[in-house]
Image: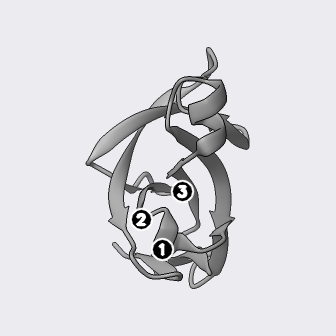
Amino acid sequence: MVLRVHNAYHTEVWVAYLYPSTFCSQNHGTSWAKAGWWHLNPNETKIVLGGDLSSKWMYYIHAHSSDGTEWGSYTYEYCPSQRFDWCTNISSNTSIKRNFDEVYSNKPDKTINLVG
């Protein structure tokens, strides 16, 4: 009942994601939240989101590696360099634009494989 990210790339990566949020919808005027950063070494897998994914259906993932490779091209969001879990309409003056890929899941478990 989780969203996992597996680093199949040859260097370390950092991962962030966008997810549907009832809290943000009810309190901040946006239906989405953003969270990051998870650090993954090569061949490491981490859970980035718990719960039954089948009820939330759509996510967006961004990753970037220590060698400058990035994953994401569908949409963008501004993210800070430090760990965060914010509604998407919240930012900071140190945030930078990050591109995210769309991830669809109609199952309770999903693993995203980051490959070069």
- Residue assigned mark 2: 57
Residue at the image position 66 percent from the left and 73 percent from the top = 47
Q: Secondary structure at mark 1?
A: helix
Q: Nearer the viewer, residue 52 or 45?
A: 52
Q: What amino acid does circle 1 point to?
A: Ser
> Is 113 situated left or right of 11 in this image?
left
Q: CA distance from mark 1 to mark 2?
A: 5 Å
Q: Is residue 80 visible?
A: no
Are the two marked residues, 1 and 3, in contact with CB atoms closer than 8 angstroms? no
Count neighbours of disc 1 (C-alpha within 10 A) and say few if under 14, some if 14 to 19, many if 20 or more.
Answer: some
Q: Secondary structure at mark 3?
A: loop
Q: Nearer the viewer, residue 107 or 92?
A: 107
> Is 103 situated left or right of 31 in this image?
left
Q: CA distance from mark 1 to mark 3?
A: 32 Å
Single out the residue that lies furthest toward the left: 74
- In this picture, is 32 found above or below 40? above
How many numbered marks does the figure carry? 3
Whole-percent x and y of residue 14? 58, 57
Number of the label disc, if any, that sits on residue 66? 3
Count neighbours of disc 3 (C-alpha within 10 A) and say few if under 14, some if 14 to 19, many if 20 or more.
Answer: few
Whole-percent x and y of residue 80? 62, 32
Residue at the image position 50 percent from the left and 29 percent from the top = 30
Count neighbours of disc 2 (C-alpha within 10 A) and say few if under 14, some if 14 to 19, many if 20 or more.
Answer: some
- In this picture, is 116 found above or below 34? below
Single out the residue that lies furthest toward the top: 93
- Residue assigned mark 1: 54
Residue at the image position 31 percent from the left and 41 percent from the top = 75
Q: CA distance from mark 3 to mark 2?
A: 30 Å
Are the two marked residues, 1 and 2, in contact with CB atoms closer than 8 angstroms? yes
Q: Secondary structure at mark 2?
A: loop
Front tag of 1 and 3:
1
Of labels 1 and 3, earlier in sequence is 1
